[in-house]
Amino acid sequence: MGRFWRTILRLFFKRPRRRPTKRRRQEPRIILDHSAPPPAASAVLRGRCRVIDGDTIEVQKLRIRIAGIDAPELDHPWGQRSKWALVELCKGQNVTVRLRPELSYDRVVGECFLDDGRDLAAELVRSGLALDWPKFSGGKYRHLEPADARRKLWRATARQRGTLPR
């Protein structure tokens, strides 16, 4: 039997040796069970937040989508600016989240407020870095949008209409 065939047989029939790896301490993860009902609408979270993107934050290791708005994705135009505007708003403040009984892409949806009572969604829409999504907000933030916001955030507008090209 030639060297080539021995190598082939070794690859297919011999178990590869595993190198011992260091075990890292794993953080507890929150896993959303889709068969279980979402959190009660009266549930309230409070604490410091970590900003994921323009319309997603993390409070107490739970990812929360800010209700009623649509901000551009990080790789879209204005996406990074939207994220950093939210970082500046939340810096050094506690965020209070009133959870809604719905899920959006494995994220809990909630209305988010700062210590001084300002609504995070309203502040982002007012600054022109997010759009009101009438399907989910009922038009609550539409009056706060600057005149050129829908043209500037054209990708978010196209996503809301369902016409975003791939």
Image (cartoon, grey):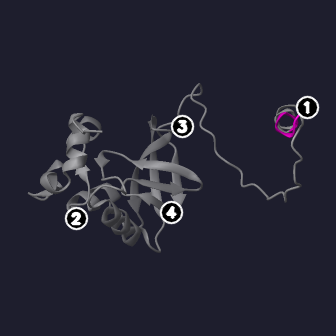
Callout 3 touching callout 2 (CB < 8 Å): no
x and y percentages locating residue 11 in the rendered image = 83, 37
Quadrant in the picture for residue 74: bottom left
- The residue to which callout 4 is attached is 50
Q: Amino acid at mark 3?
A: Pro
59 up-or-down from 36: above or below: below
Label disc, if present, on residue 127 of the rendered structure: 2
x and y percentages locating residue 112 in the rendered image = 40, 54
Q: Residues within 10 Å of mark 1 (few under 14, many from 20)?
A: few
Q: Could you tell me which secondary element the residue under label 1 belongs to?
A: loop
- The residue to which callout 1 is attached is 1
Highlighted magenta segment, given as a residue range = 2-6
Q: Amino acid at mark 4?
A: Arg
Which mark is first along the chain, 1 or 4? 1
The CA distance from mark 3 to mark 2 is 31 Å
Residue shown at the point (37%, 63%) measured from the top left = 83
Q: Could you tell me which secondary element the residue under label 2 belongs to?
A: loop
Label disc, if present, on residue 39 of the rendered structure: 3
69 up-or-down from 41: above or below: below
The CA distance from mark 4 to mark 1 is 61 Å
Residue shown at the point (50%, 62%) measured from the top left = 49
Which mark is first along the chain, 4 or 3? 3
Quadrant for the C terminus, please: top left
Q: Residues within 10 Å of mark 3 (few under 14, many from 20)?
A: some
Would you say 89 lies left or right of 145 here?
Answer: right
Callout 2 touching callout 4 (CB < 8 Å): no
Q: Residues within 10 Å of mark 4 (few under 14, many from 20)?
A: some
Q: Is residue 113 magenta?
A: no
